[in-house]
Image: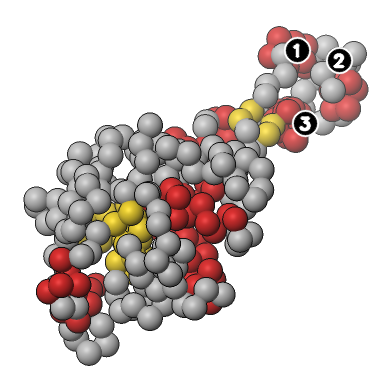
Amino acid sequence: MWKGGRVSQKVKTLRRSEIVLVLLLELVLDHGEWNDGLRLPPWNRIVMDLWFWWNGDMNESPKRRWGCLQWGVLMFCLLLLILVAQPGGSRISPQGNQMKGVNNCKQIILTLRWYAHDHENEYPDGQNREFYSANEVFRELFKVGIITDERIFGCPTTSPFHPDNELGKPPGFAKTLFPGECHWMLLKHQGISSHPRTPIIIENSLTASWPPKWSLETRAIRGRSWPRRKIIIGRNDGSVAVEQLNEDGTMDWHSKSNLGDDGKSWIDTLSPEQIASLSYWDIEEN
């Protein structure tokens, strides 16, 4: 596009404002990649075309100089190019990353419920099956063909656990959710019949014991929380929310988000023995 004076031939009868717009549009359409960044053409050719055009090397004199409108359009196009060239992640707010995490958690709960419909309303760790970690339990979802993308088991931004989507071969899927690839923890031995407000999926906490507790640190460590003491929790009814932690990093299990239709917290429906047996499947760290 930039070779052999093609730009000059195409725009020799246009006004200056139209010429610059043509150059910018060709730059975006022919050399821009909206998803993977911007690959720019040789800038010296662009500058040379503009230089010869500005100095009347197009066999005709310019009709008039630019006004405020033309300069405004040029600045807008330049700003657009700068935004396109920036990495996409740098423009995502913490709230945007939280929304991505919430969406991942919803998909995990959906796959669990789908699994339960074909397995006597129990999640993969039911029916007295022995597992050692959340990674192992979630791997069962791949073995039965419910899911084929492990990236939903990650979470954007500061999580230290990042799935690489290398699954290995069926039927074992041995490479699925290797240590260090699972961000989420699963409450043990639950199913569709469990209380709707039961927190079956949580972001990894400091330990797997009950009650879970998170660090108020926001950097990439195990058990980190979001800014302003927030954490993502998924309930057995499929709802997922970014919820408020106490000042010590624990959750108030009698807050409004934990109440059922009868006004009682899910934890109040359990016996002392059941509460004592609560724990989460732990994640496998590197």
Which secondary structure lies at badge 2? loop
Q: Position of residue 52 (x, y in %)?
A: 77, 11
Left or right of 27 on screen, residue 172: left
Left or right of 108 on screen, residue 246: left
* Front residue of 21 and 221: 221
**Residue under numbered circle 2:** 3
Left or right of 216 on screen, residue 39: right
Reply above or below: 106 against 55.
below
* Front residue of 261 and 207: 207
First in sequence: mark 3 vs mark 2 = 2
Asked whether residue 129 is in view, the answer is: yes
Contact (Cβ within 8 Å) of mark 2 with mark 1: yes
Quadrant of residue 19 in the image? top right
**Residue under numbered circle 1:** 45
Reply above or below: 281 against 7.
below
Measure the C-alpha gap from mark 3 to mark 2.
14 Å
